[in-house]
Image: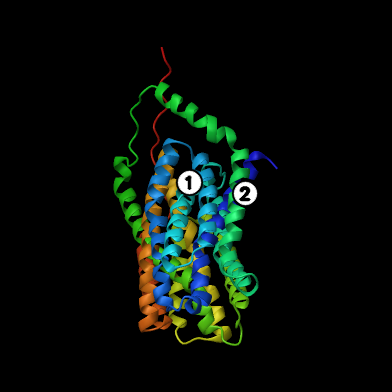
Amino acid sequence: MTKARLHFLFLNVGHFLDHLVMLVFATVAALVLRSEWNMAYAELIAYATPGFVAFGIFSLPAGWFADRWSREGMMTVFFFGIGISAMACAFARTPTEMAVGLFFVGMFAAIYHPVGLTLVVDGAKRTGMALALNGIWGNLGVGGAALLTGLMIDSTGWRSAFLLPGLVSFGLGIGYLALMWNEVVHLPGQRQAARKAAPKSKKASLLPEDNRDLFLRITIIVLYTTGVSALVFQSVTFALPKIFEERLTGIAETATMIGWATFLVAAASSVTQLAVGHLLDSLGPRTIFLIVSGVQVVCFTLMPGLTGWWALLVSLFFVMGSFGQLPINDYIIGKTATPESRASIYGTRFVLTFTILAISLPLIGWIHANWGFDTLFRILAMTSASVFIVASLLPNKVPEPAMAPPPAPAE
């Protein structure tokens, strides 16, 4: 295996761990801590909020440091950081200690999306397919969190669900550092020296006059759909174990079975993301956006009142829509941003995404405590409909930015 392929594998496994570690608590809170800590589900998930706040606000500095220091160095920090933080969560004795541990998990997990996705795009020949393959690993992490936690709950206890991935991540940090040693230790200094030595040249505008209005429209669409999609994604992924506990009566009765159901739905939905990645490269983002958001509108409208196999089937399709939507905005940013600023722009995008994720947690708990998940499904149907309308304003082809001309050779 070439170094480039091995690096891509590390980035994919990192995406898997990023989502897995962030969602272990969702299953632990839904299935165990309600009785062990004698707290309601809505009270418990509030303690996950600091972690998702950190997941958002630290994305921006992570992208900034990656662009100005070392992207590979930041990925090394990511592996070691979430490893140590996840292991700390395994030893939490109170809700406050758990909240502190989850905050540090979120802080280090925030590194992945602005930095890891930039490295994926930088090394990709086909941007859409590379993002889709990487996204599949992230989706498997979403489902794997519920499966791993369910298995651990029924065998060795919920603390193992934090400890095991923490140890794995720490070990991967050692392997990643060994693989990318030159890029982490030596290359940053060489890049800084090259920047200082390079002649100053006037850069072309990222928004040329003939495309300025179009770029502005695309930016507004990306910001809106990013925020609303984050609300839908968080509601789907964080609440899914609890939804299945309530709705899959007679199908999934134990923590392990609920974990398997969540994992299989996420794994099957990952195929959608692969198809989306392929179609993005051929059809462009507008058509794909309309399809996946339309699927979500239909499924969320049908979901209220459903239980058993029908609930499982409709859940599969709305998770497919939610996961299929993930690569679209990343594709648009990857195409429209310059390579020099891509990590910082991804960082800004994920500040918005994960801030919405954090805000949505108490919203999910409040809606569930007062009206149940049927009301949540109706709200998600309306928000998905708004995404469908806004996405229809995208152009058929996303324009690429004007690039700075190469500096003139010295006389």
Amino acid under disc 2: Gly
Q: Quadrant of the C terminus?
A: top left
> Which is in the foreground here, disc 2 or disc 1?
2
Q: Residues within 10 Å of mark 1 (few under 14, many from 20)?
A: many
Question: In the figure, 161 relative to 65: above or below?
Answer: below
| Residue that sits furthest to the right in the current view | 1
Residue 336 placement (x, y as % from top left): 41, 46
Residue linked to disc 2: 171
Q: Quadrant of residue 87?
A: bottom right
Question: In the figure, 256 relative to 229: above or below?
Answer: below
Secondary structure type for disc 2 = helix
Question: In the figure, 82 relative to 175: above or below?
Answer: below
Residue linked to disc 1: 115
Secondary structure type for disc 1 = helix
Amino acid under disc 1: Val
Residue 83 placement (x, y as % from top left): 55, 53
Q: Quadrant of residue 201?
A: top left
Q: Which mark is residue 75?
A: none
Residue name at image x 46 percent, y 49 percent = 111
Question: In the figure, 287 relative to 33: above or below?
Answer: above
Between 316 and 195, the one nearer to me in the picture: 195
Q: Is residue 275 visible?
A: no
Left or right: 1 with respect to 382? right
Between 47 and 19, the one nearer to me in the picture: 47
Q: Quadrant of residue 68?
A: top left
Residue 269 placement (x, y as % from top left): 57, 67
